[in-house]
Structures are given as C-alpha cells and as structure tokens.
Image: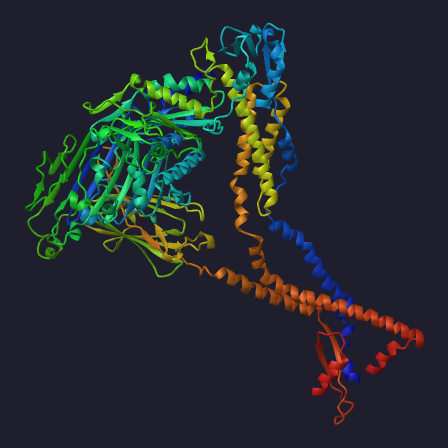
Amino acid sequence: MMDAESRFRDPSSLFFQFDTVRRYIIASYWVLIILALPLWWTTTSIERLPLPTSEVYAQAQKRLEIPLAICVDSAFSSQITSLQRSIHDAASYLDVQIHIGQDCSQFPGYAILPGEQILIEDRKLYYPPSADNLASTLASLLAPKMDHRAAQYSPRFRLSFTLLNEDSSAGQVTTSWDIQQAIARHIHPITSALGILHNYTIESQVQYHALLAFEPRSLSNGTVFGLTPEDLTIFINSAEWTLSSSSSNDPVFHFVLFIPSARRRPLIILNSDGTPSSSSAFLIPQWGGIVILNLPPPPPTTLHLDLLDLQSSFSSFSRQLLTLLGFPRLPPSISYSSSHNTSLSSWQIDTLLRQRIHENVIQSHDTLQSTVTLVSQIDGMPVDEQVQSQVQGSLSALHELFTYASVNLTFDEMLAYSAQALTLSSKAFFHPGMLAMLYFPAEHKYAVYTPLFASAMIPLLAAALREIAAWRKERREARAVGDVKEATSGDGPKVDTESVS
Amino acid sequence: MLRTSLFLISLLLSSVFCLENINEEFEEHLSIKSLRDGRVTSSFSFTTLLRDAIPRDPRTLAFDDDISQHYTLFPLSLGQILRQYAITELHLTLNAGKWNYDTWGYPDEPDVGVGAELRAWMAGDSISSIDERWQGVRNALAGLFCASLGSLDEQRTTSPRLSFPPEGALPDWGLPHELRHASHASEHVCTENLTPFLKLLPCKSLSGLATLLNPHRIFDADWHGIGLHVLWRPEGVEVRLNVQLVSDPLRISAQGKQDWSFHSLFDRKVEKACPVASSTRVSVELPNSGVYRVYPEPQEIKDGKAYYNLKNNNEAWNIGTMWPTDFEYRICHAALSPPDPALVPFSVTRNLLGPTQDRGELSIVLTNNQQDTLQLLYLETMPWIVQFYLHTIRVHSDNVPRDDLVSNISYVLPVPHARPATFESVLTLPGRSTLTFSMDVAKAFLRYTEHPPDAQRGWDLPPAIFTPLNQSLNEPMSLGSRVYTPSLLVDLATPDFSMPYNVIIFTCSVMAFIFGSVFNVLTRKFIVVRLDPPRNQSASRAEKRLENTDSDTSNELNTSKSGVH
C-alpha cells in the first residue's frame, strides 16, 4: 500500500489538474475566440463607407428656383397677375420678379415693350398692347416644352459628318466636299453661340460603299425610288457603315449626307400615305440626322461637292443639330430681328440654359437617390472612398448651386455646378467597384470555413458544456453536503479518507 | 509666358493630324509569286497617304481636344486613335502559321511572327505618359480589330534597342522617342479580325483588289496574316494595310498541277475597280525556268515580273499562270543534281529542350548558307515564365567551342509577375558553318490564378528575331530583313485545378485534429482509480492503474470496468 502511494501521486494534487486551472484553460479559449471575432469580421467584411443618405433625401426635396427678372412696360400693367401665374404654371423652377414703372428699354434683363408686331430683339420682346394672350406667349417663350428628340445633357458632344456614297462603283463617285467651309458657314454659328452649354469635337469622313440593308421601293416604272416611313427606321445600316467611333465616351451626333447609287436616283422620302414628301431629310432622335442628296445623273464620274451644293443639306443639318441640342423654337407668330448675324436670340439661349440647369438638377437628384437606395438595399455592395467622394462632391455642387442661385450666380456658373453634380452623381452610380462583391456572396465564405470551424468548435463546445454541468453538479452536491453537514455536524471529507486508506 | 503660349498655340495649329485641304491618295497593289514548293504567295497592300500631315505632338495632349479631323480616304476610326494617343509610328500584325524561309524566301512584308505583334514609336517627356498611351493604344486597337491585344500588357512589353528601327522618320520635336514592343504568340487571327480590317479600306471589300479578300480562302491558306502599318515620312503620314497569304494550289486542285488564277486562289475575280484608288496594280513574278503561260497578256514585263494595271478597265480580271505539266518536287533530285541555291543567307531552328518542368535548355542552330561571314542581331523577348542563365551560354561553331562569336550582349532582367526579359546580342557566323547557341533556362512556378484557362496546353513563347547586320566600310551599319523563328511551347508545372476545395477540406481536417488533440490534453482530468482486490488474489497486492476518463467521477463505471479485468 505504501509503495503504491509513492509510485502514483494523486493526480488531483498536480497543479494542472486543478479544476480551476482546467476551467481557466477552457475559458481562455473562449475569450480568445470572442476577442478574435471583431478582427475576423473586419478582415472579411466588405468596405462600405457611409453615404450621406439623409442629406441626399433632404437635397432631393429641394426645388431650384432660378431668378428671372422681367421689366414690363406700364402698357401691360393690367396683365401682370395673369403673367405671373402662367409662367409659374409652365415652369415652377423660375423665380419670376416683375418690375413695373421703370424705363424698360434700358433694363438689363428681359423687357416687354409695346410694339407694332410681336418681335424679339436680343432680350426684348415687342408686343402690341392691344393684342391679348401675352401671358401664354410669354410662357411658351420662357418655358417651352423640352423636345423629346433632344439628347441628354453632356459637357462635350462629338459631331460626326459623313458623306456616304451608296455605291461608288456604279458610275459616279463623290470624292470630296467642302466640308470645312460648310461647317464654318452653317455649324460654327450654332456651336459658338451654344458654346456656353457644350464643347464640340467635329470630325468628318467620306465613305464609298454604304449599301442599304433593304431594297427601296421602285415607283413610276423604276425612274423614282421611295423610302417609306418604315424604311426610315431601318435606314442606318450600322453593321456595314463605320460611323461609330470607339475612341471616346462622349455622345456623338451623326450627320449623314447620303448620295444614292447612280442606278437608284432620285431616292425620295414618302409620306405614310405613299405620296412623295417635300423633304429629303429626316432626324433620328438623339442619334443624328440624315439628308439624302440626289445628284443629277452621270456623266461626271467623279464629283466634288462645293459650298453651293452643300447649302441646302447643311442648313438641314444645322436645323437638326439645334433640335438635337434641345434648342427651343420660336412660336411661328413671333418674328425675330437681330443686330448680330445669327439666328439664335439670347432669349432662346437663356431659356435653353435654364432648362438644362433644371434638367441636370432633377437628374442628379434622381441619380443620387437611386445610388443611396441601391446601396441600402443590397448589403453586399461595396462603397469605396471614390464613390463616397463622388456622392459628396455632387451634393456639395448642388449645395453651392442652391445656396447662391438666388444671389449672385451667372448662368455660366449655375450650369457648371449642375453639370458637375450630374457628372459626379452618374460616375458614382456607374462606379465599377460597386459590383465587385456581388459575385462572391457570404455563403461561399462559410462553405470554405465550415470544415475548419465545425470540427474545431465541437470539442470546444462539448468541453464547455461538460464543465458547466460538472460545476452545477458540484454546487448541488456541495449544497447537499452542506445540508447533511448541518444535520450530522459534517463528515464529508472522512468518507474520502476512508476510501483511500 | 506669352511666348510659350504662342509657341504652344502654334504647335496646336500645326500638329493637327489633318491640315486644310490635305491631299489624300490611295493605292492598292497585289504581288503574286509561285514558290519553290508549288505554293503561291499573294501579298496585298493598301496604302493611304495623308500628304503633308504630321503626327500629333504629345505636348498638345494636355490641351482640350477641340481640333476637327476631316478625312476623305484615311480611315477616321484609326485617325482618332492615332490622334488621341499621339502615335508617331505603329505596326500591328496578326499572323497564323510558320513562315518557311528556307523554301519560301523572304516575305514581302517582313513582320511574319506568329500571333499578334504590336509595336509603336511614341514621343514623350516622361516614361509614365508613354506607358499610359501605350496601354491606351493597345486597348483601342483591341477594340478596333476585335483581337485580344489587351493582353499585351506590361508582362509582355519590351523596348529592344536595335532590332526595330523606325521604318519612317521621327519628327524632331526635341523630345525623345520611345519604342514599345509586345507580342502574343497564342493570338489566332480569324474572320472577326479581318472584317474590321476591311472596313478601314475606302472601298471595303466591294470593289478593287480587296474584292479578292474572301475570308473562306484567306483562312484556308497554309499561312495567312494581316498587318497595319502607320508611319511618317516628310511627305506625309502613310497608312499601309496588308494581307499576305501562302496558298497551296496543289492541295486545291486534284490534278497535281501548280496552276493558279484569281478564281482558284480566292474564288473571286476583280469585277469592279475601286473608283478612288489612284492606282490598282497587280504584279506576277515570273518563274525562272520551265514552260508556263501567264494570262491575260501582261501590259508590261520588267525585272522578271509581269505588271497589270486594273484601274481603267471595266472587265472582270482573272489573272493566272498555267503550266503544261504536273508539278515535280525538286526534293527527289537532291541526290542527283546540285541543290538549289539557298533563298535566304542563313537558316535557323530554335528549340526548348529538357524533359523536366523546372529546368530546360534553349538551343538555337544557325546555318550560314553563304561563303561570307555573317553578323546577326539576335533578339529574345521572353516572358518571365522562362528565365535565362546567361552564365551558361555555350556557343559552338561546327562543334568547336567558340565563345568569341557572341558579342554586344544587352540584357534586361525579367521581373517575376511584372516584366519580360529582353536579350539582345550579336552573333557572328563564319562562312558555310553551323553555329549552335545554347543556354540553360529555368521555368517558373506560377500562381494558381496566373494560369490561362487551357493551362494543360502550355505557354506559347514569342518568336526570336534575327536581323542580319550589313556592315561595310564606308556606310554606317544597316539592318537587313528580319527573320522570325516559330514560336515555342513551354510546359510549366500545372496544378490540378479541382484541388483547392480538397486542399481546404484536407487542411481543415488536419488542423481540427491537431487542435482537438491539444485541447483534449489540456483539459483532460486524470484520476486514480483503485480496483478492489479480487477475492482470489492477495489483498495486499491491490492493482492500481491510471485510468483516464472523460467523465468526472463515475465510480460505478470504473468499478464495472475493473470488474472486467
């Protein structure tokens, strides 16, 4: 008995077999796991910087009011209230201030003066005092409906002019055109007058084989060929004609001067009832314009189109360009006189500017709202610093615009702010980094971790549960022993010694 | 300040890619030649000259791009790219097949390396601006030609010093011009590259010589390639688009005759002339000997070539050559008659030897076919996946070690995962000798994600390029025609791509096992269990054993266990 005692120490007397030490070991594992959880969380979570959501929603509630001062001659004083109401109904974004009782001919802003006929000169409108509906005329001048054919605002447009020979091997080929002079005469006045709105890059090319993807209808025994309105919708053969440019992201307006093959002239546009249309030009909304130029039949095998030949085509192009840029038309009843040699009045340019500013603001509101909604809806969408700064930049541009619009901003600056807000907001919305994590969902992560975590956690959990159970049992027994002790004046340890000895 | 801005404005005005009333000229030319082995090579070239234009000065890139570009014949989409990235000279080739110099001789267009090859000369005051533009032009051309040129990234880009001198002139702007070169041997040219290529031609493939460019026949040819070359000469900017192919009339015709015609080679004829081409010419190289007939009757015969002008003729052209007899392979007579004179001054074979996946040997065998000593500029642009050991270079001439035959070595070290190696040196070939150049190489071990989708196929290594140096006493050194070797295929250690999940599972199991054991040992409770001495044994010899148990103190269990013993 005694040598057995010397050979085997009671294991419970070893320090690492103490219950407390074992419990510390188990507890330290759990403490480590709990401490490591935040680290694991941060290293595996997607970077989602906060976006100024509430500011975006607050900003979207605001409405821009562009100040507009009009001096009205006392001859029209009776119509002031109806004027104000009709303008507000047509465009709520205008903050109209009407000045009466001044000498309006010297007024720096808009002025309505009595005149013989309805006439616009610079920013002055002459109107016969006897005529009525001044209010509706003014509303249509200051806030016309935006043309749906106009392209969206962009700081830069590319104007691409293409001379298309349908089939130059059919006997006649147009090899050159006075494109630079034609642009200088017809397009530059527009681009320089509207230079405040956009920048323009102009390019031109000539193509010699531009086959149509369909056969035009032959009329009057094959002497005339016609294009029905349905044909016009498929006129552009984008697979064969190399019109698009790949080198930049700027929106392009295409202007195509189409010269039908010598075998297929004249090529005319038909109305929907089949009668020939007087026009040889048509417009594809937001894309560009096409003019069909029917040259006299051969003999000359090679042709050069000079300025005179291009006159009518380019005046069509200039009208199409104005439409595509959203330039408001004057109502037909109003005539226009100008001291400068241009067909664009400051009145119309200002109106377009105001419309574009308003449009940009609305659009950047929409884009910002969509961005924050999307980010809040999709948890797996990362938001990096760039997106955050773009959203903030867009917001601050809008903020500047709204704060100073009524104080001291020129149209120029307002447009610049609104364009900046629009560009930044759409950059944020289309930021490629926002899609990165959508294709690596959390489920994949867990699938990779489970083999390790599950097999490691089971012994940990089991040990913890067992220890808790043992601890509870011990307490219960201790209590029971205590009860017994109370009853029998305590004999518990003796049981042990007896069993040992 | 005013002077500099005036200078810059004048730069802006002068460096427009198109000046007022530029004369643009378009010429097309096709040269056809019968080869020694009965094949026929056709080389189309379409040249547009933009007279008096100069490339864009890169210093104007900082300004807003407001200048108009007006072209009549020059392709606009290409002009935009050249202008946007201020490219002075550009060469892009997409080829398929191995050009057989020994039987076909030198090609009309020297760039016949297999796969895609792109090189550009750009001026610039900073390397970063050049690299940025190089990346831009790569991506723009990739979009224009539907080719994977985007993969010609910095891992494939080199700047060899000597092998690619500018073909045209470089404008003197007081800025250094830099070359960027990249090649990708696995890129395969096909119809999707030819279609955008044809759209750059003024007459597309609807009239003129381009009518013959029938994709079915081009891509059926034994060797085919398309190329785009932009260069500047003092008279203007020239854009040359070329298509070369080597077709085999013996394969097409069942009769064993080497007769060819437009119709047999391309399945088309030239029906209509391109109305805007200032010249449309076809030249047919006449065979040196034998009886043959070239039809139709050539308009001009000069220097062994028959010339046709297709410009002012409205009939359908079907030019061809006929032989009265079947084609005879010369190789049968090699033993009897003296061999044919060599078409090229030297021939080359390049191999990658060695059976293992981590080491190998690059071996090059060059044979000088001439009496004279030949000096060759040797260029390797090797991706970092194959790394050279330069100290192991061994040069033998007719099996005699001759280390003096390699000289002027310039070497740019590869950077793993980032930069390829550039090895340029001059090899001297004594007359009528065979030179063997060999060098040990190491093959890289790639990261899991760096393998291409078809990893088991191996990696195509770009061809080596040999350029003869023509050295004479009075003239400065000039370079001869480049010779491309075929590409090599290297087999790198490839993982089993289904492994990662298995590895994860396996590693996790081991980890969990180790963790469990350690944890168990740490938290296990040992107790001494005394067994009651069995009655038939001495009471004093109570057996004591150390029993480890997971449970706390279950005496009953232990006693029952001891009862079993």
Q: How many marks?
A: 0
Left or right: residue A481 versus residue A393 is right
Residue B88 appears in the rendering: no
Residue B91 lies left or right of residue A447; in this view the side is left
Position of the C terminus of chain A by quadrant: bottom right
Looking at the image, which residue is at 57% across and 45% down? Answer: A381
Residue B76 appears anywhere in the view: yes
State how the image is colored: rainbow
Q: Nearer the viewer, residue A114 or B441?
A: A114
Image position, residue B100 (x, y; %): 22, 49
Please tell me which residue is depicted at 22% across the width and 45% down the height of the picture: B245
Whole-percent x and y of residue A67? 60, 19
The image quarter in which residue A480 lies:
bottom right
Question: Which one is nearer the viewer's eye here, A371 or B63?
Answer: A371
Q: Give the image location of residue A324, x and y in percent.
A: 44, 26
Image quadrant containing the N terminus of chain A: bottom right
Residue B141 in percent (x, y) is at 36, 38
Q: Is residue B414 left or right of residue B314?
A: right
